[in-house]
């Protein structure tokens, strides 16, 4: 094992888990997660923060909102649920610790 030479200062994990139709656990974050992931990537690029703020698409984070998507922000240890793509600027600000 070797330690990588780069690491982000913050990392947002976005659930885009998709379950089969009729699954008792619901459809998963699915399209909402995909849309949020894409918008977060655009927002991070717009702010020139690609090297320091990483955004990664994941499977289920265990929260499974009825609408929107779940995401986890580290090292802030924030779990956000029911997020939609319009929330991307605010989530990036939260991850970076920007002052409101
Ligand atoms: S399906 Fe997204 S948190 Fe479970």
Image: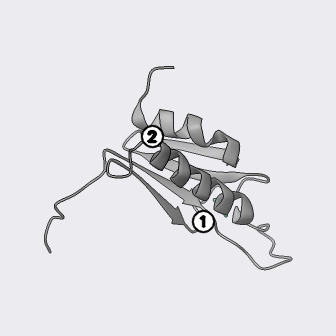
- The residue that appears at 57% across and 38% down in the rendered structure is 89
Q: Residue lying farthest left? A: 2
> In the figure, is residue 87 to the left or right of 41?
right
Q: Foreground mark, 1 or 2?
A: 2
- The residue that appears at 41% across and 35% down in the rendered structure is 96
Residues at circles 1 and 2 in contact by the CB criterion of under 8 Å? no
- The residue that appears at 61% across and 52% down in the rendered structure is 39
- The residue that appears at 64% across and 53% down in the rendered structure is 36
Looking at marks 1 and 2 on the same chain, the residue that comes earlier in the sequence is marked by: 2
Give residue 62's quadrant in the image: bottom right
Indicate the position of residue 78 as horizontal and vertical percent values.
49, 40
> In the figure, is residue 16 to the left or right of 13?
right
Residue at disc 1, CB closer than 8 Å to ligand 1: yes
Residue at which label 1 appears: 60
Q: Which mark is residue 1?
A: none
Residue at which label 2 appears: 47
> In the figure, is residue 100 to the left or right of 85?
left
Dot 1: element? loop
Where does ligand 1 appear, by image quarter? Answer: bottom right
Q: Residue lying farthest bottom? A: 20
From the viewer's perspective, is residue 99 above or below residue 15?
above
Image quarter where the N terminus lies is bottom left
Toward the viewer: 85 or 21? Answer: 85
Indicate the position of residue 57 as horizontal and vertical percent values.
53, 64
Task: Rate crowding at label 2 as few (under 14), some (14 to 19) or many (20 or more) other CA atoms within 10 Å.
Answer: few
Q: CA distance from mark 1 to mark 2?
A: 28 Å
Is residue 83 shown to the viewer in this render? Answer: no
């Amino acid at each position: 094992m070797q330690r990588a030479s780069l690491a982000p200062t913050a990392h947002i994990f976005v659930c885009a888990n998709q379950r089969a139709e009729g699954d008792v656990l619901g459809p998963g974050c699915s399209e909402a997660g995909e849309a949020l992931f894409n918008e977060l990537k655009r927002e991070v690029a717009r702010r020139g923060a690609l090297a320091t703020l990483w955004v990664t698409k994941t499977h289920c984070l265990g929260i499974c909102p009825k609408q929107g998507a779940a995401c986890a922000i580290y090292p802030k240890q924030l779990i956000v649920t029911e997020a939609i793509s319009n929330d991307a600027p605010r989530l990036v600000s939260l991850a970076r610790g920007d002052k409101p």
